[in-house]
Amino acid sequence: MPRPPRDLPGILLWLGIAAVVIGAFTLAWRSVEPPPPRKIRIAAGAPGGSYHAFALRYAEWIAREGIELEVVATAGAVENLELLESGAVKLAFHQGGAASGSHQGLQTLGSVFFEPLWVFHRTRIPVTALYDLRGRRIACGPDGSGTQRLAMRLLEMNGIDSASATLLILTPADAEAALLSGEADAAMFVSGADAAFIRRLLGSDEVSLMDFGRSLAYQRRFHFLSRVTLPEGGIDLARNLPPGEKTLLAPAASLVAREDLHPALPPLLMQALVAVHERGDLFTPAGRFPSDSHAEFPMNRQARRFLRSGPGLLYQYLPYWAASAVDRLKILLLPLITLLIPLGRAAPHIYRWRVRSRIYRWYKVLRQVDTERETNIARSLERLGSVERELDQISVPPSYGEELYNLRMHADRLRARLEAKEPGG
């Protein structure tokens, strides 16, 4: 059985098209975002606090995808924003209401939990509202903390400042110690209910938790505050802590990022936020967080899409590394499609021209042989023989066989005229 002819022109044509596509792909690749970094940093408050605890849980979750989240300890929300704006970190926790002035280049990935304001006071001191702390020693958070900024604003609204009270600038650990030892009359904390020092203070007979009876008034004045309820026994059912229901005020904590955060990271971070926060906590029902409410900075576009529509198809069905790679390569689709459409349309015409040119060029030779037959029959027969031998070596696709057989038929007719020494026609 004869070996099927090789379609060399077609192969060369498609190789040429492939070379053009690869060249265009290479040029477009240079405009694609580099792969996401393997390490990012998050400003996360003091160890032992809610920010730090949640940051560690995020780090554990995204480590599964080969990305390290370095948790940076800070004094609190104010310092977090400073580090974020300086570029020292890419992510930071932000306490609602802690921002002052204009902050450019920051985006919110989502609010993630309520962090109540806890006002503890010595039990022997009757306190029903913040104005009862006038003339007292009040621990109101360290410098650089969101606790201090919020505490100062609320105390000021109640007519308390450094002239009418002793304001102690203490870390949560030092404020707890000062309150239990009697060196402070009251202490204010912004923290989640799972913080160890909150549980210790609630279990102490030396201190009591203030109830915000005027929570609605505070909400109307400070839009970033929400009213939350600490149920009786919510902290410890066996010890019935707290012994009665308490109303607290709570800003919402948000995860904030720089605008230059790699675009492949928000989908992964949002999955981590859902995994950590969607079950809710003591103050919020399941599914409440993460959320695009309470955002003090513009929402990240990918984060908003995630919250509204869930993860995209790529991230639902592919591993993160594969989904992020495909997502990054989408930028190549438009130039490649733009290139392939005209190439696809032109390819059949180029191919047809290439195949037929291998046949039609021999008609010029046959015409020359026919012209020379009047002067030199022997030479014409010799050239025609050479042409016929080369025609036997030509291979074309079956769809172009008719043109090749017509060429051979014309060569046979010319040979017949030469051998009969016919003058023409």
Image: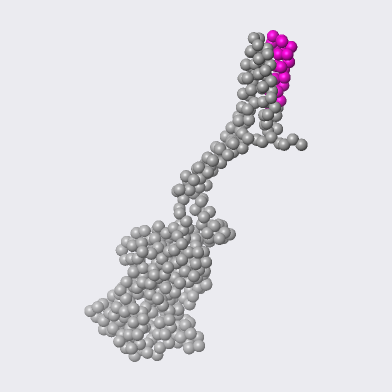
- In the rendered image of this protein, does residue 317 appear above or below residue 171? above
Q: Which quadrant holds residue 360?
A: top right
- The colour mode here is one colour
Q: Can residue 419 be found in the magenta stretch?
A: yes
Left or right: 298 in relation to 321: left
Point 71% across, 36% down: residue:
4
Q: Position of residue 112 (x, y in %)?
A: 45, 69
Point 48% across, 71% down: residue:
57
Left or right: 60 in relation to 81: right
Point 66% across, 9% down: residue:
374
Q: Position of residue 70 (x, y in %)?
A: 42, 68
Q: Nearer the viewer, residue 298 or 19?
A: 19
Magenta highlight range: 403-425
Q: Which quadrant holds residue 261?
A: bottom left
> Does residue 127 show up?
no
Among all residues in the image, which is located at the extreme left? 163
Point 43% across, 87% down: residue:
203
- In the rendered image of this protein, does residue 88 appear above or below residue 238? above
> Does residue 186 show up?
yes
Q: Nearer the viewer, residue 353 or 102?
A: 353
Q: Main secondary structure of the magenta part?
A: helix
Among all residues in the image, which is located at the extreme right? 1
- Count the labels in the image: 0
Q: Can residue 408 be found in the magenta stretch?
A: yes
- In the rendered image of this protein, does residue 83 appear above or below residue 210? above
The N terminus lies in quadrant: top right
Q: Position of residue 227 (x, y in %)?
A: 42, 74
Left or right: 134 in relation to 398: left
